[in-house]
Amino acid sequence: QVQLVESGGGLVQPGGSLRLSCEASGSIFSIYAMAWYRQAPGKQRDLVAAISRYGVTSVVDSVKGRFIISRDNAKNTVYLQMNSLKPEDTAVYYCNTAVASTWRDWGQGTQVTVSS
């Protein structure tokens, strides 16, 4: 059974940085594009960034120039480097495959709070 374990969240001041990690057990990691999603209170879960199995990346406009997604296939881990954080980035961050039809069970996510 595939497990997705997110970590690295926390409380940070506006303008600060955090690096999130997601370790995926099982065989999905080397096969699929992976992605980070976030869900703010009272809102739906939205895609933030995605990376193909070959390392081609994309991010949504709201985080372009601030967030960087990367992956280490040897460690079955995908990362999200978040810089210049804003209060509107506050959310629970999750990782999963990048295509909805291939989603696995969601992990617990990691809370990111941007506040002074």
Image (cartoon, rainbow, N blue to C red):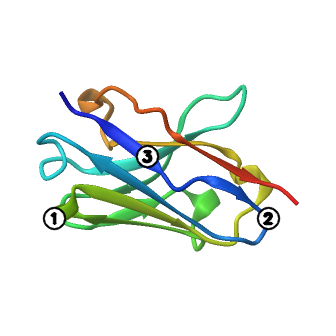
Q: Do the residues labelled 3 and 2 touch (CB within 8 Å)?
A: no
Left or right of 44 on screen, residue 114: right
Q: In which quarter of the image is the C terminus?
A: bottom right
Q: Tell me the number on the disc at residue 44.
A: none
Residue type at the position of mark 2: Gln
Give the SS element for disc 3. Answer: strand
Residue identified by numbered label 2: 13
Q: Is residue 32 above or below residue 116?
A: above
The front one of 8 and 92 is: 8
Left or right of 8 on screen, residue 31: left
How crowded is the residue under tag 3: few (<14 C-alpha within 10 Å), some, or many (20+)?
Answer: many
How crowded is the residue under tag 1: few (<14 C-alpha within 10 Å), some, or many (20+)?
Answer: few
Name the residue rendered at 37%, 42% in the picture: 5
Q: In this view, does 1 lie above or below 25?
A: above
Give the SS element for disc 2. Answer: loop
C-alpha separation, residue under disc 1 versus residue under disc 2: 33 Å
Q: Position of residue 56 (x, y in %)?
A: 28, 67
